[in-house]
Image: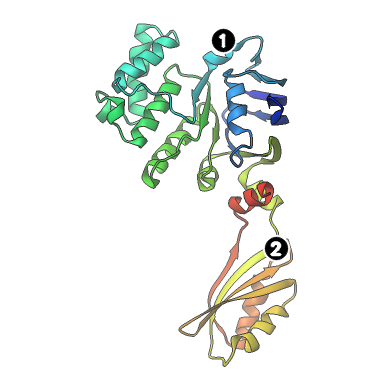
């Protein structure tokens, strides 16, 4: 089940929300759709799910065009909007049965799917409670169950962990990873650690345009700046900025050094080296030569958060 987006553009009046974007999502992929507020993420998801038409461009889901075959596309997609579409006066079972009937599920299949969703989404203990009485985490689980009740091949999830506490985020993240083994998943989120832990691929949008597309590792490699080495060493010196700093600065490929202070005689430095270089061995040899006690020597990778800020900052 693949999604193909080509030259997608959307205007709201004179304002361009999406600017000629194209991307693919392969069968079985979990793709994180990232961007700052107003970047066009939710608009793109609404177009893919046939919630609204594009101003220009095309979207195909499993070969079905959203303009020509919208009903077939909707049958194949489960959608969890950012604002969870829940009826608070219904209990969990009633609501999921209602959602299933909207999808035209027959009684025999409904019973099986209802039991499956309650099990998969961890709703057994609250299945007879009114939705309005549930915590935010359980409401999100009900929303996910609603999106999956008709066993869709594609899941479109807009901020699925919004407002959840750290424990609830982990639970929903694990559920999404489990679902991704059998389904194609596109999710948007502002929690970048969640993307790194969950997604196979990342698409970053800014001001309606795609600015990056790749695996988290590829993006970290492509957009990294200087190599960062953090060291902590213990030695008796009168002035670390005189006795240690120049010796670190003189190492090959070191572009700059920052002193992070000392605690109980342990001095902390950040060394920024030329991109692609690895100065750890040279740092170690220098420490041996100077009789420094090396307490830490860590190579820091560029985080996905740094990549995001670099690509989306104004």
Q: Nearer the viewer, residue 175 or 169?
A: 169
Image x and y of residue 133, in percent: 27, 30
Q: Position of residue 245 (x, y in %)?
A: 65, 82
Circle 2 SS class: loop
Circle 2 residues within 10 Å: few <14, some 14–19, many ≥20: some
- Per the image, the residue denoted by label 1 is 71
Q: Quarter of the image holding residue 62? A: top right
Q: Is residue 62 above or below residue 23?
A: above
Foreground: 52 or 215? 52
Label located before the other in sequence (1 or 2): 1
Q: Is residue 225 visible?
A: yes
Left or right of 163? Residue 244 is: right
- Crowding near pointer 1: few (<14 within 10 Å), some, many (20+)? few
Circle 1 sits in a helix, a strand or a loop, which is it?
helix
Residue 47, image quadrant: top right
Q: Nearer the viewer, residue 116 or 161?
A: 161
The CA span between labels 1 and 2 is: 50 Å
Residue contact between numbered discs 1 and 2, judged by CB atoms under 8 Å: no
User: Measuring 60% from the left and 12% from the top, which residue is drawn there?
Assistant: 70
Place of residue 82 in the rendered image (x, y in percent of width and height, measured from the top left): 49, 31
Q: Which residue is mark 2?
A: 226
Residue at the extreme front of the image, as rendered: 14
Residue at figure coordinates x 72%, y 72% from the top left: 254
Q: Is residue 124 left or right of residue 309?
A: left
Q: Is residue 184 left or right of residue 283?
A: left
For residue 44, which numbered disc appears in the image? none
In the image, residue 161 above or below residue 282: above
């Amino acid at each position: 089940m693949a999604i193909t987006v080509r030259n997608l553009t959307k205007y709201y009046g004179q304002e361009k929300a999406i600017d000629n974007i194209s991307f693919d999502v392969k069968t079985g992929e979990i793709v994180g759709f990232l961007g700052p507020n107003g970047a066009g993420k939710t608009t793109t998801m609404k177009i893919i799910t046939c919630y609204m038409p594009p101003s220009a461009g095309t979207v195909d889901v499993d070969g079905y065009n959203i303009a020509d075959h919208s009903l077939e596309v909707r049958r194949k997609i489960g959608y969890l909007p950012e604002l969870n579409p829940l009826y608070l006066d219904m209990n969990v079972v009633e609501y999921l049965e209602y959602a299933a009937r909207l999808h035209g599920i027959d009684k025999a299949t409904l019973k099986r799917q209802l039991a499956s969703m309650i099990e998969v989404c961890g709703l057994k203990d609250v299945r007879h409670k009114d939705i309005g009485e549930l915590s935010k985490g359980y409401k999100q689980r009900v929303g996910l169950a609603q999106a999956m009740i008709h066993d869709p091949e594609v899941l479109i999830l807009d901020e699925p962990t919004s407002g959840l506490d750290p424990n609830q985020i982990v639970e929903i993240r694990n559920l999404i990873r489990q679902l991704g083994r059998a389904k194609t998943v596109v999710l948007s989120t502002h929690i970048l650690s969640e993307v790194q832990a969950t997604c196979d691929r990342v698409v970053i949008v800014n001001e309606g345009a795609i600015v990056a597309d790749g695996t988290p590792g590829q993006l970290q490699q492509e957009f990294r700046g200087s190599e960062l080495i953090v060291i902590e060493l213990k030695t008796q010196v009168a002035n670390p900025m005189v006795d240690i700093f120049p010796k670190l600065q003189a190492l090959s490929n070191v572009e700059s050094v920052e002193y992070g202070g000392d605690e109980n005689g342990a001095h902390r430095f950040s060394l920024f080296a030329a991109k692609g270089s690895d100065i750890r061995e040279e740092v170690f040899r220098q420490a041996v030569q100077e009789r420094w006690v090396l307490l830490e020597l860590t190579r820091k990778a560029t985080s996905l958060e740094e990549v995001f800020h670099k690509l989306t900052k104004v």
